[in-house]
Image (cartoon, rainbow, N blue to C red):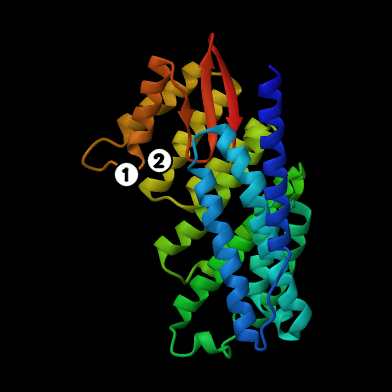
Amino acid sequence: MKKIIIVISYCAIFFIILALLINIVTSLVPRFSTYEEQKKYGSKMYDVAGKIDEAVFYTTSPFRCKLIKQILLLPAWNKSVKANLYILKKFPQAKEDVDVLGWIADSYFYGKKYDKARGWYEKQLEVFKRKYFKNLSYPERKDVIDKKALTEELRYIVNIQDSIATCHTAVGEFSKAIDMYEESLRFLEEAYDIDRYDREMIFRKTYIYIAKVYKVALKDYQRAFETYERMKKEFSDANSVCAADIFIGDTHLAVGNIQKAKEIYEDVLRNYKYPNSPANYGEAQDRLRCLKDGSSIVALDGVVYKIKNGKVIVKYF
């Protein structure tokens, strides 16, 4: 028993020293003479942290995930923050660089510092709207069709606003999250001239996010149903309507009405028979199979439904 305690103590000391060394290394930010070189380094640190984050995500062992997170992942995002904050300190033009502002915001976000992340996302959004949105004079718009440029601008804005809303959700500010998502939907009016498919891909997910907050966080199921109906009205193509109907079935599951959910999934199978079946048609089949064999349903909006003893357990990530 004494030997085991000694081994554990040595291991603990080893990991503490390793963590200290990593923190010392990550606190050092090399100084470059030009903005381009310093920004390239900031970008590199952001990319490295992202790759480590991805590796942790695909690591199955909870112990290994926690160990990698404490020793590698959090220091990596901290390094990214420091590297990009230094750019702001040394080069005034960085304050108008949406790339740098976005790297800082993302680094705080993935480091789970959501309040700080939200503040930097808001700065990134303000700069982008002022410098780029509908501004025909910026270099990237040269020789680009206005419709294509507007599409990418709207995509950029909605992505930032979704990130801000996610930060609100992470700290329990659900009403603020919904307000920000609704702000994204107000850009639908700006998007009538862009490609129909792009418009749907940019904005449809926002309806899903709103309904998820109502359904899981606030347990306001009626508002969730209403949000899916809004999605169907806005996007009347088969893919969107089919997806909304499946999410409506999922919401009945969240309420605890398993039989009603089954009826909705069965209706989807009847209404979208081959050869006109949309891409997500198979999800209804999968849900019915899961309900039959008792396995968990993992929905595309990140909500997990598990049936146990006739009751529905709802989790989300």
Q: Give the camera-side residue of 59 and 137.
A: 59
Task: Locate residue 198 relative to residue 183 in the image: left or right.
Answer: left
The residue under label 1 is which amino acid type?
Answer: Pro
Q: Give the camera-side residue of 5 and 117.
A: 5
Q: Where is 237 relative to 147, above or below?
A: above
Asked if marks 2 and 1 touch (Cβ < 8 Å), the reply is: yes
**Residue under label 2:** 242
Quadrant location of the N terminus in the rendered image: top right
**Residue under label 1:** 278
Decide if residue 140 is in sight here: yes
User: Where, by quadrant of the figure, is residue 282 drawn?
Assistant: top left
Q: Give the camera-side residue of 22 and 170.
A: 22
Residue that appears at 62% across and 51% down = 73
Q: Is mark 2 on a helix, strand or loop?
A: helix
Where residue 202 appears, as percent x and y from the top left, is 50, 60
Please tell me the numbered disc located at residue 144: none
The residue under label 2 is which amino acid type?
Answer: Cys
